[in-house]
C-alpha cells in the first residue's frame, strides 16, 4: 500500500512539473481520437448522419453504447469515491499534485485558465441553457429543447446530490484568482462542461449540415478538457474531483441522449 501511494505521489509530482505540456498532449490525443472516431462512423454510414430525418446507427447499437457509457461512468465514480479518505493513496496523490501545481504553473498561465474556467460557471451554463432552449423552440424543436433543459437541470441536481453524499472539502489553499464555495467531489464545472457542451455536440449532429459537425465535436472536446484542467491549475479541485465530474457528466449525458434517441426512434416508427 505504501509503495502504491509512493508511486502515485511520484507520478502526481511529475504531472505537476509538466502540467502545461501534459494538458496539450492529452488534448491533442483526444482530438485525434475524435477525428478517427468520426471518420470511422462516416465510413460505416457514408450516406447517413444523425440528422433530424435519419436515425443513423441502429437503435440497438445506440442503446448498447449509451448503457456502456453509463455503467463505465458510474464505475469510475464509485471507484474514485471508495478510495478517498484521510491517508488513502489517492487522497495523498491528489494533495501532492495540488501542492506542486502551486509552484509549477506560471502566473500568466493561471490567469488564462482563470478566464477560461468561467465557461462552465453556473451562471454561464444557465444563460447558455436558456438561449439554446429559446432557439430550439423558435425553430419548432420542442422535443430537443425539453431534452436539452432536462440534461442541464438534471446534471446540476445530480452533482449537488453526489457532493452531499461524499462530503469532501476543497483544497485548503485555492488560487486567489477565483472563488469556489461548497463541497469538492465531484467537480460541478467538469460535469457541467461535459453535459452542456456534449449536448451541444449532439444537437449539432442532429441539426447542422455535415460539414459543421466535426468542428463542433472538436470544439466541445476542447472546452471540456480545458475547463477540467482549469479547476486543477487554479487549485479549486483535486484531480479525482475532476475525473469524477467527467465520469458522472458522461454517464448523465449518455442517459439523456439515449432517452432522446429512444423517443426519436419511437416517433419515427409511428410516423
Image (tube, helix red, strand yellow):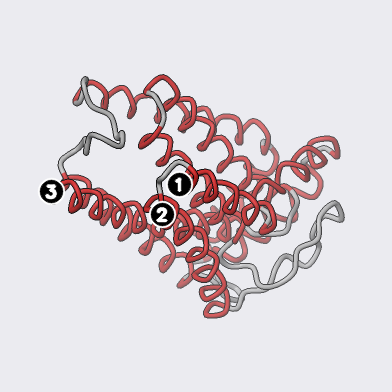
Chain-order first, disc 3 or disc 2: 2
Q: Residues within 10 Å of mark 2 (few under 14, many from 20)?
A: many
Chain-order first, disc 3 or disc 1: 1
Residue at horizontal 57 percent and vertical 53 percent from the top: 129
Q: Residues within 10 Å of mark 3 (few under 14, many from 20)?
A: few
Q: Secondary structure at mark 3?
A: helix
Question: Residue 269 has which mark?
Answer: 3
- The residue labelled by disc 2 is 253
Chain-order first, disc 1 or disc 2: 1
Q: Nearer the viewer, mark 3 or mark 2?
A: 3
Horizontally, residue 196 falls left or right of residue 183, namely left
Question: Residue 88 has which mark?
Answer: none
* Quarter where residue 24 is shown: top right
Question: In this view of the protein, which residue sits in the foreground, 235 or 1?
Answer: 235
Give the spatial CA distance, label 1 vs label 2: 7 Å
Question: In this view of the protein, which residue sits in the foreground, 181 or 270?
Answer: 270
* Quarter where residue 262 is shown: bottom left
Residue at horizontal 64 percent and vertical 59 percent from the top: 238
Relative image position of residue 112 (x, y in whole percent): 78, 37
Relative to 120, say whether 240 is above or below. below
CB within 8 Å, label 1 to label 2: yes
Residue at horizontal 77 percent and vertical 40 percent from the top: 105
Q: Nearer the viewer, mark 1 or mark 2?
A: 1
Relative image position of residue 81 (x, y in whole percent): 48, 70
Relative to 75, say whether 14 is above or below. above
Relative image position of residue 216 (x, y in whole percent): 49, 30
Q: How many marks?
A: 3
Give the spatial CA distance, label 3 vs label 1: 24 Å
Question: Residue 199 has which mark?
Answer: 1
Residue at horizontal 34 percent and vertical 51 percent from the top: 257
Q: Secondary structure at mark 1?
A: helix
Amino acid at each position: 500500500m505504501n509503495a502504491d501511494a509512493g508511486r502515485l505521489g511520484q507520478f502526481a509530482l511529475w504531472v505537476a512539473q509538466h502540467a502545461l505540456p501534459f494538458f496539450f498532449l492529452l488534448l491533442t490525443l483526444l482530438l485525434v481520437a475524435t477525428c478517427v472516431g468520426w471518420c470511422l462512423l462516416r465510413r460505416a454510414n457514408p450516406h447517413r448522419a444523425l440528422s433530424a430525418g435519419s436515425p443513423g446507427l441502429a437503435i440497438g447499437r445506440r442503446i448498447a453504447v449509451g448503457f456502456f457509457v453509463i455503467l463505465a461512468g458510474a464505475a469510475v465514480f464509485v471507484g474514485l469515491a471508495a478510495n478517498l479518505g484521510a491517508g488513502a493513496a489517492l487522497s495523498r496523490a491528489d494533495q501532492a499534485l495540488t501542492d506542486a501545481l502551486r509552484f509549477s504553473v506560471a502566473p500568466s498561465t493561471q490567469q488564462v485558465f482563470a478566464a477560461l474556467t468561467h465557461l462552465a460557471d453556473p451562471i454561464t451554463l444557465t444563460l447558455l441553457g436558456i438561449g439554446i432552449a429559446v432557439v430550439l423552440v423558435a425553430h419548432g424543436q420542442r422535443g430537443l429543447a425539453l431534452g436539452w433543459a432536462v440534461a442541464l437541470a438534471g446534471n446540476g441536481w445530480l452533482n449537488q446530490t453526489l457532493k452531499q453524499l461524499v462530503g469532501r472539502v476543497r483544497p485548503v489553499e485555492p488560487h486567489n484568482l477565483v472563488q469556489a464555495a461548497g463541497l469538492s467531489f465531484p467537480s460541478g464545472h467538469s460535469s457541467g462542461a461535459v453535459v452542456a457542451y456534449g449536448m451541444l455536440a449532439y444537437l449539432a449532429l442532429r441539426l447542422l449540415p455535415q460539414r459543421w459537425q466535426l468542428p463542433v465535436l472538436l470544439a466541445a472536446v476542447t472546452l471540456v478538457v480545458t475547463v477540467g484542467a482549469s479547476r486543477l491549475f487554479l487549485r479549486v479541485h483535486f484531480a479525482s474531483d475532476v475525473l469524477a465530474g467527467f465520469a458522472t457528466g458522461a454517464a448523465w449525458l449518455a442517459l439523456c441522449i439515449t432517452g432522446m434517441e429512444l423517443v426519436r426512434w419511437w416517433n419515427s416508427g409511428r410516423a
